Image (cartoon, rainbow, N blue to C red):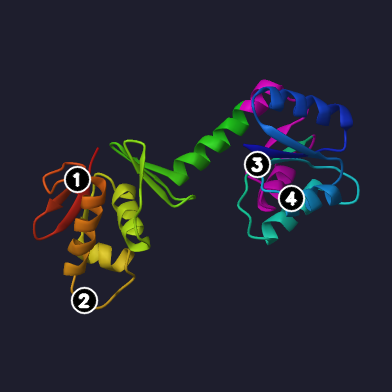
Amino acid sequence: MRLLIVEDEIGIQNFLKQGLEEEGFIVDTASNGIEGLDKFSTGNYDLLLLDWMMPQLTGLELCKKIRETNSQVPIIFLTAKDTVQETIEGLKSGANDYIKKPFSFEELLERIKIHFRNDLEEKVLKLGNITLNKDKHQVFTNEKEVSLTQREFELLEYLIKNKGKVCTRTNIIEDVWDIHFEYDTGVIDVFMNAIRKKLNLSKDEELIKTIRGVGYIAND
């Protein structure tokens, strides 16, 4: 995981960089908001740590500019601000979290891990021995990659997201195919047969079960 620390206090910057690199992160640093924006624009970061008060461009202003690019990268503010209104202002600017100075490194590390854990939970879906990575558009079964078409991938993702619920053919046509008029739902069976074949699942397989006359249900 690659982090960017934007902090004008060099002592804090070096302390955080050393500690996070010892935890296995790749860490870049910037000493002001302008430098931070430049590095963000040219790098691919998984999380940003922004000091609130910085020269040239404040952390608040930097956060707003980053969100204007439609980036959803998690942002944590490092701040001495502690009023409710200032906290609200920071969150409204697009930050995901904040930690008040002075803080313990252990607390910061746990907050970072929580954001990565949440991010991975959203991107990686599991069903039995099947793993679907939305971000990389990959599907694995027993750790072997399986090649699915775009529609097959979307259908499998839909079933896993709704694990434990019966997905009717009407629901699937509307939510996956985005068709909201009378349509031959038999096409879903064609795609399901292809998915089962590629994943080596039988029609009686409990992972993705056919509910005759209704639709499908995915279960671990």
- Asked which quadrant contains residue 10, the reply is top right
Counting residues from the N terminus, which is met first, the one under dot 3 or under dot 4? 4
Q: Amino acid at mark 1?
A: Leu
| Position in image of residue 64 (x %, y %) | 73, 56
Judged from the image, the secondary structure of the residue bearing numbered disc 2 is loop
**Circle 1 SS class:** loop
- Numbered disc 4: secondary structure: helix
Separation of marks 1 and 2 at Cα, in angstroms: 27 Å
Residue 102: tell me if it is visible: no
Residue 102 located within the stretch drawn in magenta: yes
Dot placed on the residue nearer the N-terminal end, 1 or 2 = 2
Residue lying at 65% horizontally and 41% vertically, measured from the top left: 47
Task: Assess disc 2: are there few (<14), some (14-19) or many (≥20) residues with their C-alpha within 10 Å of its C-alpha.
Answer: few
Q: Which residue is at the far bottom?
A: 181
Closer to the eye: label 3 or 1: 1
State which quarter of the image contains the C terminus: top left
Q: Which disc number belongs to residue 183? A: 2
Question: Which element type, helix, strand or loop, lies under badge 3?
Answer: strand
In-front residue for pair 109/20: 20
Residue topped by disc 1: 201
Q: Earlier in the sequence, mark 3 or mark 1?
A: 3
Q: Which residue is mark 4?
A: 40
Mark 1 to mark 4 CA distance (whole Å): 44 Å
Where is residue 77? Give x, y as percent. 72, 40
C-alpha span from label 2 to label 3: 44 Å
Check the picture and name the quadrant holding the N terminus.
top right
The residue where tag 3 is placed is 47
What residue is at 35 percent from the left and 60 percent from the top?
Answer: 149
